[in-house]
């Protein structure tokens, strides 16, 4: 395995070279040095799908597909050695146990809503660490949840406000 690549999560701004608000062309240019990509047209929006090493990256341009609204990164999968670190501060979100990520978030002054244990998120603040469920055979907590998160989403501050209806 070669040198590790770091993708730094920048809440409310982006992930790695991709920034929220970028145009489709700017986002394609940002991901192109990392390898092959495809642009999928889904309804009014677009999604750029690209690997970064063995981490899957989806760059989402919703609504009219004119600007990046979210970046989602997916864990490489069971039995795969990661060649990419996805960093939130000093924590690799795919190798740091989820409970430790949430504790460290609280130490930073962030609130993490874990009322839906499989879909923890930070109200009005992202990244969203999700989902904590998988059909793969992975280490699990006593509650049956995977020890680690399997994906992370970076988007604008009100991206998950639909979850706040009952809060």
Image (spheres, helix red, strand yellow):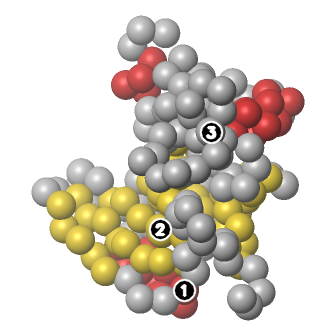
Residue 151, position in %: x, y?
53, 52
Question: Disc 1 versus disc 2: distance between alpha carbons?
Answer: 10 Å
* Mark 3 to mark 2 CA distance (whole Å): 25 Å
Whether residue 100 sits left or right of residue 142 in the image: it is right
Mark 2 lies on a secondary structure that is strand
The residue closer to the viewer here, 3 or 138, is 138
112 versus 151 height, above or below = above
**Label 1 neighbourhood size at 10 Å, few (<14), some (14-19), many (20+)?**
few
Q: Which residue in the protein does label 1 denote?
A: 34
* The N terminus: image quadrant: bottom right
Q: Are marks 1 and 2 in contact (CB under 8 Å)?
A: yes
Residue 137 percent location from the top left of the image: 52, 51
Q: Residue furthest top?
A: 166
What residue appears at the point 66 percent right and 72 percent down from the top-left corner?
82
- x then y, percent, for residue 123: 56, 26
SS for dot 1: helix
List the single residue furthest toward the left.
Answer: 43
Contact between labelled residues 2 and 3, with CB atoms less than 8 Å apart: no
Does the image show residue 42?
yes
Mark sitting on residue 140: 3
Q: Is residue 159 above or below residue 21?
A: above
**Residue at (56, 62) in percent of width and height:** 78
Dot 2, how many residues are within 10 Å of its Cα: few (below 14), some (14-19), or many (20+)? many
Q: Residue at x 19, y 68 (%)?
A: 41
In the displayed structure, does residue 64 sit left or right of residue 118?
A: left
Query: Could you tell me which residue is drawn at 48 percent across and 69 percent down?
Result: 56
Task: Tell me which label, 3 or 2, sits earlier in the chain.
Answer: 2
Mark 1 or mark 2: name the one nearer the start of the chain.
1
Find residue 57 and name its label: 2
């Amino acid at each position: 395995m070669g040198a590790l690549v770091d993708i730094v999560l920048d809440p409310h701004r982006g992930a790695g070279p991709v920034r929220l608000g970028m145009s489709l062309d700017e986002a394609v240019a940002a991901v192109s040095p990392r390898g092959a990509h495809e642009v999928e047209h889904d309804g009014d929006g677009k999604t750029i799908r690209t690997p970064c090493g063995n981490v899957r990256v989806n760059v989402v341009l919703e609504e009219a597909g004119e600007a990046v609204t979210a970046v989602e990164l997916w864990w490489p999968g069971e039995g795969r050695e990661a060649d990419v670190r996805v960093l939130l501060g000093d924590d690799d979100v795919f190798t740091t146990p989820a409970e430790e990520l949430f504790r460290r978030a609280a130490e930073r002054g962030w609130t993490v809503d874990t009322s839906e244990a499989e879909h923890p998120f930070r109200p009005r603040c992202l990244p969203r660490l999700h989902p904590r469920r998988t059909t793969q055979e992975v280490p699990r907590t006593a509650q049956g949840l995977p020890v680690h998160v399997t994906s992370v989403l970076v988007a604008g501050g009100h991206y998950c406000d639909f979850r706040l209806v009952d809060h």
